[in-house]
Amino acid sequence: MVSAIRSMGLTGLNGFDVSVECFLSQGMPAFEVVGLPDAAVRESRERVRAAMKNCGYEFPVRRIVVNLAPADTRKEGPVYDLPIFLGLMAAGNDLSVPPDAAFIGELSLEGQTRPVTGMLPMALAAKASGVRQIFVPEANARETSLVTGLDVYPVRHVRELLDHLTGNGQIAKAPPYQSQPVPFECPDFADVRGQDNVKRALEVAAAGAHNVLMIGPPGAGKSMLARRLPGILPELTNAEALDSTGIHSVAGLTSREEPLLRFRPFRSPHHTVSAPALVGGGRIPRPGEMSLAHNGVLFLDELPEFQRDALESLRQPMEDQQVTISRVGGTVTYPARFMLLCAMNPCKCGWYGHPAGRCRCSEESVKAYYGRISGPVLDRMDIVIEVPSVSYEELSGKEQAESSAAVRKRVCAARLKQQARFDGQGPPSAHLTQEQMREVCALDEAGDKLMKSAFERLGLTARAYTRVLKVARTIADLTGSETVAPPHLAEALQYRQLTMGN
Ligand SMILES: Nc1ncnc2c1ncn2[C@@H]1O[C@H](COP(=O)(O)OP(=O)(O)OP(=O)(O)O)[C@@H](O)[C@H]1O
Ligand SMILES: [Mg+2]
């Protein structure tokens, strides 16, 4: 008496087919799960046993072997409760399960379903491997219905599922996904008085997805400005929205009612965050802050306060736009293409360089303060901008500052220009490849001369050189210019001028 039920597994963001085979045989009553199950999968036995008994079904007094094929890939989490339950019912009774149906879900001891994480990537993989009907916990149904071309059946209780499969009842299919208008809640740039230069820098950064470091005294509005950045970013494209939602789904952060992320994620971990929390990890490797910020912003406020190893962990992912987490039996890769936004004071007391001479720090302590941030991390900043204290005139002025909506319009126009390049596949400037960059960031003779003198004067690295060119490209896009002209380059170079304590 063998049954085979289709289900899905997940390694990182990659879903794969799992066949849950149940074999009931004569012999000493036992219940074994094989096929590289982790602890949560092994515990399925107890949940399934209890659910069966509590629902009035007879638990088979047999030797039960459940094999999760393929046997050489790790199976994690409680997603196999539902298929194991069904497999036992099918092996012991006359129950026919459609061959194009897959089952995923955790069970309570009473047979109700419980939501699981990573449903979206699993459902996408299920569809790709020919599944046409998918039975999932009710709480996951809306997220599953983001995958078009799958019949999604929300299961509340195993009894309902058995009734459905035996023709004694019918579970209604989940309606196709329709997005609901969600209000975008983000404070407005108009609240910030003065700081026009900083706002301009943030606009450039938003238009090209560049990294920004803001340096300024306490109370100048750095945190305030940073929190307003999402308001000037373009909406996620459909493909980006699915990608980001997949990552949030694996982390268990999607909302039941509105699972699709529509707005760019803004992650601001506290400075006590550990390197593994940024990178991701754990027994079942979960995405870290860098991956949760994929397609959005990672904001590190009070940059020098972060632990050194946490900051160092940013280096490779920022080059590769993905993080690789090593673990027993292989590695897991999550995408991590984010804009890094950082804020810091110029020194320990916060007032270095203040015109009124309020700073009490020695030159050494100022240097040591910057020393906490390693050179390679600073080198990855595209735009370094000073946020000066706001004057009384600016604070008390009556002039209305520009709204986020107005800035966002210009940002979106520039992004559209970038996207139109390379057969409509153009990335934001920050993510241009070397080859693409040569094509769209070419300088004329005057620009070349300007770049050469700045390169030598500022002691730019090769990385900084390409980053300056990309920022200049973005500025040209904001201006509506097809070529990168000297004024665009000059502005880009200005964002590398800050001497940073040297
Ligand atoms: N430019 C500004 N316009 C209007 N209000 C401001 C401005 N700058 C600061 N404020 C007010 O001061 C408060 C503190 O600003 P904010 O927290 O952004 O400072 P900060 O630069 O991050 O300081 P710190 O270095 O101490 O973190 C804000 O919540 C806001 O009420
Ligand atoms: Mg602050």
Image (cartoon, grey):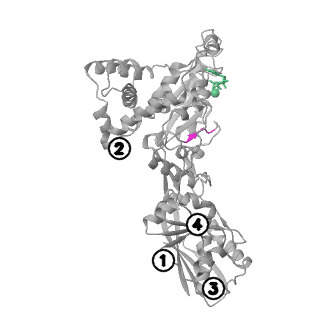
Image mark for residue 63: 3
Residue highlighted by disc 4: 136
Instruction: Kindly state the secondary structure of the residue where label 3 is placed.
Output: strand
Question: Mark 1, mark 3: which one is toward the viewer?
Answer: 1
Contact, CB < 8 Å: mark 4 with mark 2?
A: no
Q: Residue at x 60, y 57 (%)?
A: 283
Q: Are marks 2 and 3 in contact (CB under 8 Å)?
A: no
Decide: few, some or many residues near mark 3? Use Cα within 10 Å; few <14, some 14-19, many ≥20: some
**Number of the front mark, 2 or 3:** 2
Q: Is mark 4 within 8 Å of ligand 2?
A: no
Numbered circle sitting on residue 425: 2
Is label 1 in a helix, a strand or a loop? loop
> SS for tag 2?
loop
Sequence-first tag of 1 and 3:
3
In the visual, does 48 lie left or right of 238?
right
Q: Total of numbered circles in the picture?
A: 4
Residue ID for mark 1 = 99
Which of the marked residues, 4 or 3, is nearer the chain's N terminus? Answer: 3
Q: What separation in Å lies between label 4 and label 2 (alpha carbons)? A: 35 Å
Q: Is residue 11 left or right of residue 54?
A: left
